[in-house]
Structures are given as C-alpha cells and as structure tokens.
Image: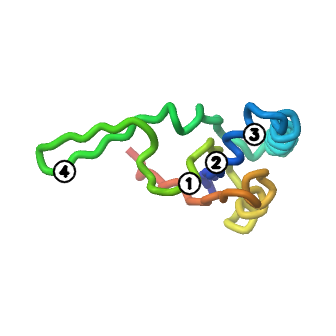
Amino acid sequence: MQYMLMFYISPEDVASRTDERAEAYMAGWNAYVGAMYQSGVVLSGEGLDPPSTATSLRIRGDKRSVQDGPFADTKEQLGGFFIIDVDHLDAALEWAARAPCASTGGVEVRPVMVRAAQ
C-alpha cells in the first residue's frame, strides 16, 4: 500500500535550518532519509522551501484570493513529504515515528488514493 508522509515542522525547526543547530538538525534528517531510501520503501519525496516562500490560493464563488505565505492558521507548516510503499498502516506509522519532526511538529500519514484502471 502507498502512504504519503507529510512532515509538519515547528517554527523552531524552520529556524534550525539556518542557526547554530543546523548541523545537528540536518544530520538527523540525513540519517532518517538515508534509512528510508536504504530500506527501499520510498517511491518519491522532497523537502520544501521554508513556509515564507509559499503562496496560497482559494476560490469562493467567482472570487479568487491569493495570499503570500502558507494558508494554514497554525504555527506548524508542511516542510516536506515522502510517498512510501509498505505492507500496512503500522509500517507507515513506524517510519513516521522516526522522523525528526515527530517530536517537535508532527507527521500526517495518509493512504494514497487508488486510481481505477483506465
């Protein structure tokens, strides 16, 4: 089964990409990413630029609203994702629990929608 792991990072995680904690922060992510690729579960994935680079769009009726920054009204922001292929949800949750941001932000695990044969 395919699952998307979405990594939500705290403001402190975002700051640690550039401050004195950057080396330790990136070492944690590098170890996690390396373990995932080595296991063979990764189908695709990428880190994202900081939330401050986001642009959000909403359409309500015939009105289009575009705003700078992430749309979510929360301090945690989407920092990256993986699509993985594992046997069951428990395996996906095990990978999610190993993410460095699981203890400071969060990880959303969601099944990938299965497309009907075309």
Q: CA distance from mark 1 to mark 3?
A: 15 Å
Helix, strand or loop at label 2? It is helix
Left or right, residue 57 beside residue 32: left
| Residue position marked by numbered label 1 in the rendering | 75
Query: In the picture shown, does residue 51 fall above or below 86?
Result: above
Residue 90 in the image: x percent, y percent? 73, 68
* Distance between mark 4 and mark 2 Cα atoms: 30 Å
The residue at the point 64 percent across, 38 percent down is 45
Q: Earlier in the sequence, mark 1 or mark 4?
A: 4
Nearest to N terminus: mark 4 or mark 3: 3
Around disc 4, counting alpha carbons within 10 Å, would you say few (fewer than 14), some (14 to 19), or many (20 or more)?
Answer: few
Indicate whether 9 appears above or below 37.
below
The residue identified by callout 2 is 11
The answer to whether mark 1 and mark 2 are in CB contact below 8 A is yes
Q: Quadrant of the C terminus?
A: top left
Q: How did the renderer colour the structure?
A: rainbow
Badge 2, how many Cα within 10 Å: few under 14, some, many 20+?
Answer: some
Q: Which amino acid, mark 3?
A: Ser
Q: Earlier in the sequence, mark 4 or mark 2?
A: 2
